[in-house]
Amino acid sequence: MIVCKSAAELETMHRAGLIVWGVLDALRHMVRPGLTTLELNEFAERSAMEKGARPAFKNYRGYPASLCTSLNEEVVHGIPSGKRRLREGDILSLDFGVELDGYYADAAVTIPVGAIRPELETLLSVTRGSLDRAIERVRPGSRLGDVSAAVQEWVEKNGFSIVREFVGHGIGTRMHEEPNVPNYGDPGHGPRLQEGMVFAIEPMVNAGRPEVRVLEDRWTAVTADGSYSAHFEHSVAVTSNGPWILTRPREASGSSW
């Protein structure tokens, strides 16, 4: 069952979302060659706790860290390491969530480390653009398939591929609620969107083929062909005024990231 949230619940989720936004925005400005992914994890965990929130990923289903740090060909769920240092030309996906007063928020962003190749700039731009287009469909009366199809159409039109093994999800009093939100699908299909529904929409896009595999750590998913991958995400509510991105400030404008 898809749970619709009240106005008060959405406000709480927005407060949680602003903490997620603040942490990821700070990390965007911190990222530079030489830093370890463990240092980024420690900053994210400390920052969330200082604001009264609980890092949601730590120990969730056994995940050992507070932040997911996925480099280059790593698609999602990369585990931070003190031995993994960022290098010029890397792309780094950061996925972070918190729980605040019983409600969750979740977002992700892919960041260039220094100067990156033009084709990687395009990968990031297209993935970000697919999220923007999906968010535009988050309106009462739309179908969930409209959201999914918006991602797929934009990504494939631009020559990239959609990861199918991992999808977005509902979010609220649990990190993962119904429904699943695939990044592929047919417009006009799926549940009809209603006010108060909240979705974590998260395109994961590969420069090469769509297939992925999971490493021996049982968490880190990588592209099967070694191509680079990008990941952008926001928690988005359905309202009578259109989509409300809960994981960024109300006054923000332009691209979702």
Image (cartoon, rainbow, N blue to C red):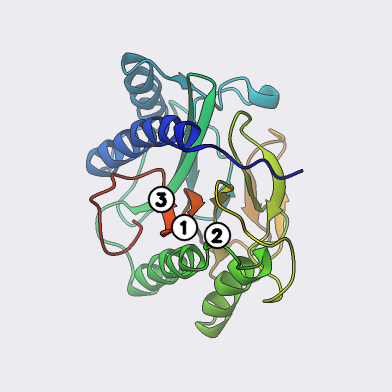
Q: Which of the marked residues, 1 or 3, is nearer the chain's N terminus?
A: 1
Mark 3, residue position:
245
Residue type beneath disc 2: Pro
The CA span between labels 1 and 3 is 13 Å
Q: Are marks 1 and 3 in contact (CB under 8 Å)?
A: no
Query: From this viewpoint, is residue 208 visible?
Result: no
Q: At 41% from the left edge and 34% from the top edge, which residue is drawn?
A: 11
Which residue is label 2 attached to?
203
Q: Quadrant of residue 188?
A: bottom right
Q: Are marks 3 and 2 in contact (CB under 8 Å)?
A: no
Seen in the picture, residue 231 relative to 22 is either above or below; the reply is below
Q: Is residue 87 visible?
A: yes
- The spot of residue 10 in percent (x, y) is 47, 37
Q: Which mark is residue 240?
A: 1
Q: Is residue 185 left or right of residue 232?
A: right
| Image-based side of 29 in relation to 24, left or right | left
Q: Amino acid at mark 3?
A: Ile
Q: Secondary structure at mark 2?
A: loop
Camera-side residue of 13 and 134: 13
